Image (cartoon, rainbow, N blue to C red):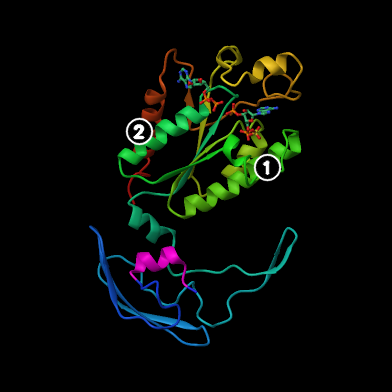
Amino acid sequence: MIAAGAKSLLGLSMASPKGIFDSNSMSNSRSVVVVRACVSMDGSQTLSHNKNGSIPEVKSINGHTGQKQGPLSTVGNSTNIKWHECSVEKVDRQRLLDQKGCVIWVTGLSGSGKSTLACALNQMLYQKGKLCYILDGDNVRHGLNRDLSFKAEDRAENIRRVGEVAKLFADAGIICIASLISPYRTDRDACRSLLPEGDFVEVFMDVPLSVCEARDPKGLYKLARAGKIKGFTGIDDPYEPPLNCEISLGREGGTSPIEMAEKVVGYLDNKGYLQA
Ligand SMILES: Nc1ncnc2c1ncn2[C@@H]1O[C@H](COP(=O)(O)OS(=O)(=O)O)[C@@H](OP(=O)(O)O)[C@H]1O
Ligand SMILES: Nc1ncnc2c1ncn2[C@@H]1O[C@H](COP(=O)(O)OP(=O)(O)O)[C@@H](O)[C@H]1O
């Protein structure tokens, strides 16, 4: 079965899940590819195509060639699992988007400006035609991580899951902005280790507790000081600042969210992430 997104990228008809597709052409400013697909009734699929430019040769759909691939593995509690490859790879998606997938990991105390920076950065990159997606701690806890509390092991699991999701976004070629307190160094380092060298950009919102507490936009510090929230980061739960982060923001007085976002965009540009 061809994923809907892949179909539209390849210019295939959505109407005919089995049988012979007529060739369609997909064109954008960078390339043109004409694909002719044949899907047999037993589900095995082959594609032949005319290729122009740097679009990869399409040998099979979803990497399914009907041949046995690689051994079965055990990962954690998952037994007898197999990694599936696809001939359309990260490098191809990046070329399509004219950018490089990566993770911008924004860490800092509650009220330090993580969400504000994430949003400013997203807007700035969007204006440049770059595709981003924000994984915000507060938001992810409304769904995927709604089963997790703020005790240490649940925060660790929160960060682990977001790190894995962020890795998938980066593999999709997207600039993923993860914005979480992520108070423990080992958890952040574990997320870093999931990605190729350079693709994890740790941004520290270096804003003193006194400033965050004065801002207190949600009234949480007040509740924590009053003992109505237990284990609040910075009050009665630890925050471990990064030791070797790529970017540190906030110490220079009066730095606006826009100036901060510009600094991150400058970094990405310099490192080549804003082109394929
Ligand atoms: N005990 C405690 N400590 C810290 N923060 C708390 C707590 N309880 C609720 N909140 C709210 O949850 C938001 C932080 O969620 P995160 O997923 O980023 O936290 S963590 O990374 O798992 O530590 C955080 O959002 P931000 O203020 O945007 O950081 C708070 O609104
Ligand atoms: N660079 C900044 N300078 C001054 N105030 C800021 C800045 N960034 C954010 N704020 C303000 O600080 C408060 C907390 O910002 P927020 O982005 O929600 O922090 P966090 O996501 O880290 O909890 C908000 O009221 C926001 O308007």
243 lies above or below 209: below
Amino acid at dot 2: Gly
Q: Residue furthest bottom?
A: 41
Decide which of 116, 275 is in the foreground and name it. Answer: 116
What's the mark number on residue 146? 1
Residue 210 horizontal/vertical position (percent): 59, 12
Tell me which residue sits at (60%, 44%) in the image. 162
Q: Residue furthest left?
A: 29
Element at badge 2?
helix
Q: Magenta stretch?
A: 2-11
Which secondary structure dominates the residues rendered in magenta?
A: helix
Tell me if 247 is positioned left or right of 30 in this view.
right
Task: Answer yes or no: is residue 194 visible.
Answer: no
Structural distance between the alpha carbons of marks 2 and 1: 35 Å
Tell me which residue sits at (36%, 29%) in the image. 262
Decide which of 213, 147 is in the foreground and name it. Answer: 147
Residue 275 horizontal/vertical position (percent): 32, 48
Tell me if 149 is positioned left or right of 179 in this view.
right
Residue 78, by quadrant, is bottom right
Element at badge 1?
loop
> Which is more foreground, mark 2 or mark 1?
1
169 lies above or below 126: below
Label 2, on which residue? Answer: 266
Tell me which residue sits at (31%, 81%) in the image. 22
Residue 109, by quadrant, is top right
Task: Answer yes or no: is residue 245 visible.
Answer: yes
